[in-house]
Amino acid sequence: MKYFNLNKSILVCLILVVTTANGGVRLKELGRFDGIRDNQLVGYGLVVGLAGTGDSSRNKTTVQSIANTVKNFGITIDSKDVRSRNVAAVLVTGTLPPFSEKGDTIDIKVSSIGDARSLAGGTLIMTPLRAPNNEIYALAQGPLSVGGYAFDSFDSVVQKNHPTVGIVNDGGLIERSTRDSFLKHNQMQFILNEPDFETVSKISESINGKLRGVRAEPLHAGKVNIHFSNLSMSEKFKLISAVENIEVIPQIKARVVINERTGTIVAGGQVKISDVTISHGDLKLVVNTKYQVSQPFFIGRANNGVNTQVIPDTEIEVKEKIASSVDVENGANVSKLVESLQSLEVSTRDIIIILQSIKRAGALHAELIVE
């Protein structure tokens, strides 16, 4: 990691990502097996126990939900009689990991959907979480952990972070096991996170050359079909583990990622720049207006048409710095470019504009991503 001080107040962080020639990357870091995936869950619930920071009576959904909830306990109440601000309607979300079994727990996130000011101190009551097929896979309940607060008095408000979003650690109890089907007819597919023809070819060659009882062939740039011999299930699982731990050197796509908010530039080690000349200069326009008072001089009594006038005196000054330029040689990387720009004392925003201009000029041979 290198830090380049471009001026007195701005630091640009440049990270070079390089894959060494001696060590590869395990397949389990490059992708996943088809059929092994996370599943999203969502539910609607209520957070109770708030100290007057919940939804107001204007939220008819919350009021009706309170009436429906107490009805389940044998208490009949008209929704028009509900005036509590200690309850908030929320959406509950969670992620169901692969190979989940009954009794496992997951973390859940709770987000307010009404006009509640804060969920701090609240408790989520039992909420069913459903998958896209509308089946219930988990039940969520527990006290919220909110990483913020909000206090208000009259027109004064003090707030930190987002107090209307909270987390219940291990608050989701799985009620239905997942059915992950990844091995069909003695074969399975490996899916790459970054499709690439050369990487797929290397994976197939490594599997075929290092493992017996396994045959791999690429289907396209992002998928490899793996066929197992007629072996027992325990032997197949050993081979699957061996496949996951095979190391290959993947082809990394040349990218430059820029975060404008933090001033961070992340560049791959394979990013190259062709011959380019960068000129940087500033044009400063100053408009200065001075108002002068014109006071008439007279002896005796002034006529009705005589009065005081304010006369603007405008001066326009243009200041233009002599443009500085740097030359970047063919084959230089982004690190060399930033070192060259350091002599120009440019800001982070200027670096972003310069990189975009170099990309448009065809001299930056990488994908430019601005966040």
Image: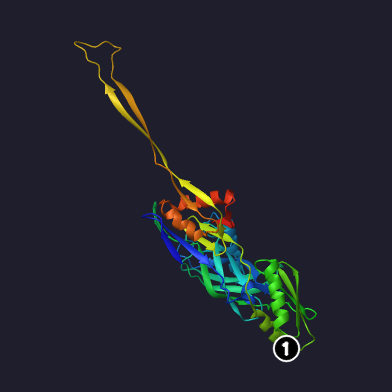
Residue placed most toward the observer, 110 or 286: 286
- Image quadrant assignment for residue 182: bottom right
Q: Which amino acid does label 1 sit on?
A: Glu
Q: Against 211, is 31 above or below?
A: above
Residue placed most toward the observer, 170 or 70: 170
- Image quadrant assignment for residue 189: bottom right
Count of marks placed on residues: 1
Residue at (66% x, 76% y) in the render: 98
Q: In which quarter of the image is the C terminus?
A: bottom right
| Residue 81 x, y percent position in the rendering | 55, 59
Left/right placement of residue 288 relative to residue 270 reads left
Residue placed most toward the observer, 281 or 324: 324
Count residues near mark 1 (Cα–Cα under 10 Å), then give few for <14, some for 14-19, many for 20+: some
Residue placed most toward the observer, 166 or 153: 166
Question: What colour-coding does the image apply?
Answer: rainbow
| Residue 285 x, y percent position in the rendering | 40, 36
Residue at (25% x, 16% y) in the render: 296
- Asked whether the viewer can see residue 172, the reply is yes
Which residue is at the far left?
299
Q: Against 34, is 111 above or below?
A: above
Residue at (55% x, 50% y) in the render: 358
Left/right placement of residue 197 relative to residue 261 reads right
Give SS at disc 1. Answer: helix
- Asked whether the viewer can see residue 262, the reply is no
| Residue 366 x, y percent position in the rendering | 59, 58
| Residue 36 x, y percent position in the rendering | 68, 75
What residue would you read off at disc 1? 235
